[in-house]
């Protein structure tokens, strides 16, 4: 199959969807698909193996996406044009009225991977304003596509309300490689205490991460187990540090994928008290599962059913509005992590069943082929 993949960003840019596009394109190519990635300038991006890369628009001038149709026709023919969609990927504040006309002008069947759809119209007031253009833009894209994929079940009802084309859940994969070291080896390389109870946090500095919950849980665990320390990856570190009181915090900042996986391997327990609950679109959670890390997180109506149904002593979901219970569960799991050296090992198997890149790529291709056959 000849696939054109449209992504607003691509490595070495620090961008989650850009990383997703890199891993997806590589896996599709390894499975025998012919893949060309269309993305933004600069033209001197490192070229991935087995995948063609075409830089054809300026992300700072979103109207230049109009040149996509010419770039696609010049590098084709293609069977599908897959759009990696988050409204903010193609325009400032999600304003990208040039995107859907450019897709239609390409004259190729369009499939959309919805990483996000549009902002929820609650506070802050900016979300209310941005929805004025993001929602009709989403509707146009849903109507234009011939196949749709969504990163979490939450988006399915939204897409199916407007799209005649079939849609399916396709969780995201991990954007970091799997670390092959043991926990002790990883800690030695990072100069971390081999005997510490290491709580892990990973992600952007965003209110959805609930650093105050993380701090409360860390303080409670530290009070019972004085060897407790916190290891933070990403921008969230400073917020966690200010919330943890006397609990030692290692804030390692934003890092490349291999360095992220090294730190994940060093952790004992992963804390993720998300405001909107765990879901299949949370790359930090997927990376923790990939490394077999015990996870204490939150659940909400938005949470995907296959995650709600996961039964494991190393996987605990508490209501999104119950901080007290979150701290209790984090303490219980921390104690188990101290007593059981392989606590959470079965989560790696769960990851490989639902989130491994070969599985994701196979499901995407199967969906595209089904649509092709139905259209013939």
Image (cartoon, rainbow, N blue to C red):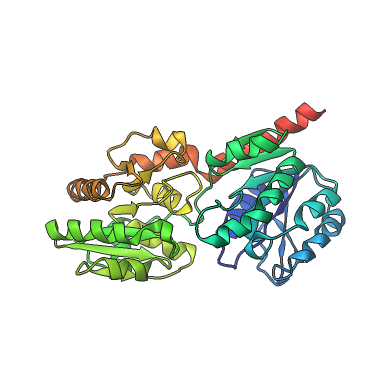
Q: Is residue 295 left or right of residue 10?
A: left
Q: Is residue 333 above or below residue 153?
A: below
| Quarter containing the C terminus | top right
| Quarter containing the N terminus | top right
Give residue 59's position: percent from left, percent from top: 70, 67
Q: Is residue 337 left or right of residue 168?
A: left
Give residue 354's position: percent from left, percent from top: 49, 38
Determine the image quadrant of residue 160: top right
Residue 362 shows up from this direction:
no
Q: Say which of 244 and 251 sits in front.
A: 244
Q: Say which of 280 and 101 sits in front.
A: 101
Give residue 123's position: percent from left, percent from top: 50, 57
Residue depicted at x 82% and y 48%: 104
Residue depicted at x 51% and y 44%: 356
Residue 177 shows up from this direction:
yes
Residue depicted at x 35% and y 64%: 232
Q: Say which of 32 and 259 sits in front.
A: 259
Residue depicted at x 48% and y 52%: 283
Give residue 69's position: percent from left, percent from top: 84, 56
Determine the image quadrant of residue 374: top right
């Amino acid at each position: 199959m000849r696939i054109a993949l449209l992504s607003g960003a691509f490595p070495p840019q620090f961008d989650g969807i850009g990383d997703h596009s890199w891993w997806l394109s590589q896996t599709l190519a390894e499975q025998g698909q012919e893949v060309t990635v269309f993305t933004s300038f600069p033209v001197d991006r490192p070229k991935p193996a087995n995948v063609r890369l075409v830089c054809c628009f300026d992300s700072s001038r979103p109207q230049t996406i109009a040149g996509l149709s010419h770039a696609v026709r010049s590098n084709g023919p293609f069977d599908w044009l897959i759009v990696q969609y988050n409204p903010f990927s193609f325009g400032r504040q999600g304003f990208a009225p040039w995107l859907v006309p450019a897709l239609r002008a390409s004259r190729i069947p369009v499939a959309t991977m919805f990483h996000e759809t549009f902002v929820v119209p609650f506070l802050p007031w900016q979300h209310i304003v941005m929805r004025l253009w993001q929602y009709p833009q989403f509707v146009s894209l849903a109507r234009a596509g011939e196949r749709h994929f969504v990163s979490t079940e939450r988006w399915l009802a939204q897409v199916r309300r407007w799209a005649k084309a079939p849609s399916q859940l396709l969780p995201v994969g991990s954007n970091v490689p799997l670390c092959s070291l043991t926990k002790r080896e990883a800690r030695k390389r990072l100069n971390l205490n081999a005997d510490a109870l290491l709580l892990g946090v990973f992600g952007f500095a965003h209110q959805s991460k609930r650093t105050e919950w993380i701090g409360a849980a860390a303080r409670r665990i530290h009070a019972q187990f004085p060897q407790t320390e916190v290891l933070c990856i990403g921008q969230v570190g400073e917020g966690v540090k200010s919330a943890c009181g006397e609990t030692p915090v290692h804030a390692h900042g934003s890092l490349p994928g291999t360095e992220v996986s090294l730190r994940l391997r060093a952790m004992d327990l992963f804390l993720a008290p998300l405001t909107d609950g765990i879901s299949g679109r949370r790359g930090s959670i997927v990376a923790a599962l990939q490394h077999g890390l015990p996870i204490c997180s939150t659940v909400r109506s938005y949470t995907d059913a296959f995650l709600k149904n996961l039964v494991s002593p190393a996987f605990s979901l508490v209501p999104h509005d119950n901080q007290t219970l979150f701290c209790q569960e984090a303490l219980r799991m921390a104690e188990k992590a101290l007593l059981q050296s392989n606590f959470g090992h079965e989560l790696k198997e769960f990851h490989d069943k639902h989130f491994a890149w070969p599985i994701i790529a196979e499901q995407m291709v199967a969906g595209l082929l089904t649509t092709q056959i139905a259209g013939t």
